[in-house]
Amino acid sequence: MTAHHHLAQINIARLLFPIDGPELADFVAQLDPVNALAEQADGFVWRLVDSATEGTVRIYEDDWLIVNMSVWRDPDALEAFTYSPEHIAVLRRRREWFARAREAMTALWWVPAGHRPTVEEAERKLTELRAKGPTAEVFTLRETFPAPGQV
């Protein structure tokens, strides 16, 4: 990270059931507590919040995809939250709620500090990652790249 850049991330998941159905009740019940932990995490900067449709922002013209977008200080901060015990507990149950991914569902990219990415921007980044694989422009936690201007 440089003082001039933060790390944006998007991750999407394809629901197996309607978001308001009983099959997803446990997942939905964990959204607020896990989001609160993210917001309190060291290195957290911002997350997409749409109070009218929390967790149901539309992407790829697909009502069955849910969206999580956030901005972090750097990859280490995002990774620390991602692998925290509370978040891992939810991740372990993902097969109960979400379809297996056949393509990249998470993308990371550097943004100028203070920038808040749009869903459209994130969709472009995820599409680019799917087409080209990890690059300095868009990448994954497994293969990160330094912020612009950082050696």
Image: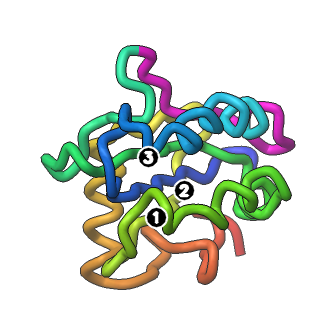
Q: Residue at x 40, y 55 (%)?
A: 12
Marking on residue 23 = 3
Region rendered in magenta: 39-51
Nearest the eye: 70 or 26: 26
Q: Which residue is mark 2?
A: 110
Asked whether disc 1 touches disc 2, contact meaning CB atoms under 8 Å apart, the reply is no
Q: Position of residue 104 (x, y in %)?
A: 38, 74
How far apart are labels 2 and 3 at the CA level? 36 Å
Quadrant (top left/top right/bottom left/bottom right) for the N terminus:
bottom right
Label 3: element kind: helix
Q: Please state if 106 lies on the left or on the right of 58 as rendered.
A: right
Q: Residues within 10 Å of mark 2 (few under 14, many from 20)?
A: many
Tell me which label, 2 or 3, sits earlier in the chain: 3
Q: Residue drawn 78% across and 37% down? A: 37
- In depth, the one of 49 and 8 nearer the eye is 49
Q: Which residue reaches farthest top?
A: 52
Find out whether residue 49 is within the magenta segment. yes
Residue 95 is left or right of residue 37, and the answer is: left
